Image (cartoon, grey):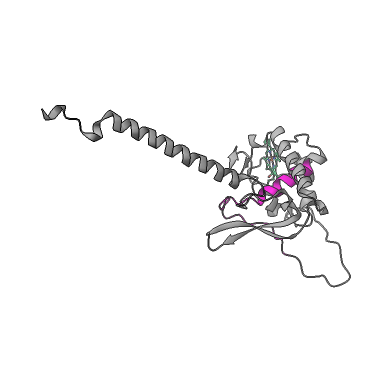
Amino acid sequence: MSQTQELWWASESFWRKTAIWVTAGSFVVLIFLTFDTVDQITAGSKSERVKAYSVINNRIDYVFDEKRNFQVPVIGPEEPLFGKKLTEEEAMAMVSKGKLTTQAKNCMNCHTLLGNGAYYAPDLTKSWLDPMWGSKETREQTMVNFLINPQDHLYNALGRRMPNLGITEEEARATVAFLKWMSAIDTNGFPTNFKPIDQTDAPAPAAPVVEPVVEPMAEPAAPAQQ
Ligand code: HEC
């Protein structure tokens, strides 16, 4: 009788073999992807997606790339953080301390880092490049001061202030190193349409050199009372 004749695609042995081959094939693909991912997320690896920690010795910019059709980090000339050039080991120690500080103080409870975290406060991926810090010359210290005493500032229209988290000066400096390093990570254009701080070198000033005066944000003048 034809009904008792087994069709090859309905046989148990065919599906058993298929299951074994698909599982084995997926296993090989997953091993390949694991190695590929490890390279993509390791600082200073071949893929260059995550830069070596000593990138904090250089200027980091965020520039539109025509070919990829989004902004990418561009590593510029030497511009050591806090004016001190570090070795890869020293830079790694500093960035690690900054990362540990962000974990210990749970910054992700309010902020996102690389898009992960909470949406109460701004994303910190490119915070190093935020024009809010004023000029590239004063930025480092402004950031340190902000992290130590954030409660005095109100930059956003939402009216939200960051609380004082009891961050020491050393932790604040390390956090700035962590934020600078993070801004150099190639995130496939995240965040989009981000306008970075102006980092072009000003033309050599004509003598005599006048120290720039940093004005506090001025209140608009009150209209004259009549
Ligand atoms: C309780 C919520 C909260 C926590 C926790 C918090 N922040 Fe904030 N943070 C804010 C808010 C709100 C602002 C916006 C303040 C402003 O605009 O004046 C802010 C702003 C900032 C900015 C400026 C961002 C920019 O570029 O505009 C930085 C940098 C920052 N925080 C870093 C940190 C770090 C680092 C930590 C952890 C050590 C942290 N924050 C923890 C709420 C928080």
175 vs 4, nearest the viewer: 4
- Quarter of the rendering containing residue 89: top right
65 lies above or below 165: below
Q: Residue at x 39, y 37 (%)?
A: 22
Left or right: where 189 falls relative to 218: left
Is the C terminus in the top left, top right, bottom left or bottom right quadrant? bottom right
Residue 15 in the image, given as x and y percentages of width and height: 31, 32
Residue 201 in the image, given as x and y percentages of width and height: 75, 65
Q: Is residue 173 magenta?
A: yes
Tell me which segment is drawn in magenta. 172-200
Residue 112 in the image, given as x and y percentages of width and height: 62, 41
Left or right: where 188 falls relative to 1: right
Q: Residue at x 60, y 56 (%)?
A: 72
Left or right: where 47 falls relative to 98: left
Residue 71 in the image, given as x and y percentages of width and height: 58, 57
- Quarter of the rendering containing residue 62: bottom right
Q: Is residue 13 visible?
A: yes
Which quarter holds ligand 1?
top right
Is the N terminus in the top left, top right, bottom left or bottom right quadrant? top left
Left or right: where 130 falls relative to 202: left
167 lies above or below 130: above
Q: Is residue 219 visible?
A: no
170 vs 84, nearest the viewer: 84
27 vs 119, nearest the viewer: 27
91 vs 223, nearest the viewer: 91
The residue furthest right is 208
Q: Is residue 125 magenta?
A: no
